[in-house]
Image (cartoon, grey):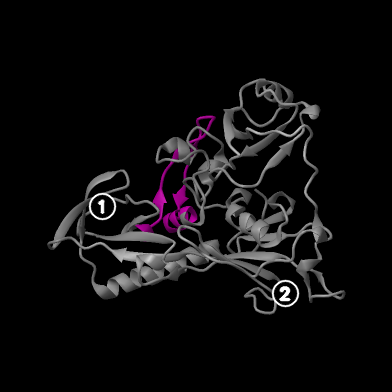
Amino acid sequence: MGFNSYTVQKGDTKDSIARKFGVPWVTIWYATPNSALRSTPGFVSVTEGGPVAPVGTVIWIPDRQELAPPKPPLKGSAAKPPLTMLSKSRNVNESLLIDPGSSRSPGEFELRIVPYIFMRPMEPEGAEGTADISWRKDVRYTKWNPQDFEDFKAKSKKRAEDFWNNRFRMWPPDGYHYFNWPAGKGGKPAAVVCTVVIKYVDNAGAASHVVRCYHRAQGEQTGSLDHLDWTDAILEEQSMDLRDKTGKTIPTKNVTLAHEVGHILGLDHPVCSGSERLCYGEGGEPWQIRNVMGAGDLVNKTNATPWLERLERHTGVPAAQWTVDTLDSFGNPLYL
């Protein structure tokens, strides 16, 4: 099946888009605000009329349409019992679904995403070299002291996991009894707590992601990096004051390491891909600027996408049917 992309225009309705593509109804596949095209379809009946999505949203319409809309997916116990593991393959992070008996969150299931990362120390031919890293040309770098490199790896892993662990709690739809605990008739519905555990591997062939690591030369001040090219500046927080759509300046402090690991998990900037300030939220909503995948240090439900996608694959329950609670770093609910 192929897809036709379409950008929602002012005045569009479900009916008008259906007519534009010559079909009696439309199945819309859409890109979430923080990700590329996803595999979860949003079924939209044209008989309802009304707007489809905000102007400027890119939607994807299959080139084969049936004569009638599909029936809604079955809910609850009609879905499959969960798979305990989704194995990794090249550029795909492994995920584990762990029951409360083994989970690190007593009484709750744990959905653990496991990136397999090979950290490659970049060594210049001489005592010092230069490299183009992200948007910056001729960044000066030097050789790693072996112990410094191991310390850098350990700090990177800990800070990333500390930020992302336990930020989201997922609840299954009513009637999905496979997440009752204890298992069986006496069990009660249990939540799924979301975590990430970075696993370092010894060679690129075993990795889902290869990260090139640069040790900045003395006096090199650039903080330039991206999700597969890190300098030791990734351990620092970076400020980027942007203006929202009203022109108000939103001061921020970005948790750089959490941002770049967010890309490894599959998240994108809140507005668009790319390094332009627009993609980080400039000229947009304040929450986009403050979000960790923008220029800030906050999370909201858009950042739960990597776990929601895996829950769907683990259970067969569509991502849209899960209830997502967003938590702060202390486990308190966030209302974003």
Q: Which residue is mark 1?
A: 221
Residue 190 appears in the figure: yes
Q: Residue at x 53, y 44 (%)?
A: 36
Secondary element under disc 1, as helix, strand or loop, is: loop
Range of residues picked out in magenta: 234-263
Residue 9 relative to residue 156: left or right: right
Quarter occupied by the N terminus: top right
Q: Residue at x 60, y 59 (%)?
A: 328
Q: Is residue 45 above or below residue 126?
A: above
Secondary element under disc 2, as helix, strand or loop, is: loop
Front residue (pair 159, 323): 323
Q: Which residue is mark 2?
A: 107
**Few, some or many residues within 10 Å of mark 2 (<14, 14–19, 20+):** some
> How far across and how far down the image is residue 172, in percent?
75, 59
Residue 325 relative to residue 285: left or right: right
Q: Residue at x 62, y 75 (%)?
A: 104
Residue 137 relative to residue 295: left or right: left
> How far across and how far down the image is residue 225, in percent?
34, 51
Q: Is residue 25 above or below residue 167?
A: above
Q: Residue at x 58, y 31 (%)?
A: 4
Q: Amino acid at mark 2?
A: Gly
Q: Amino acid at mark 1?
A: Gln
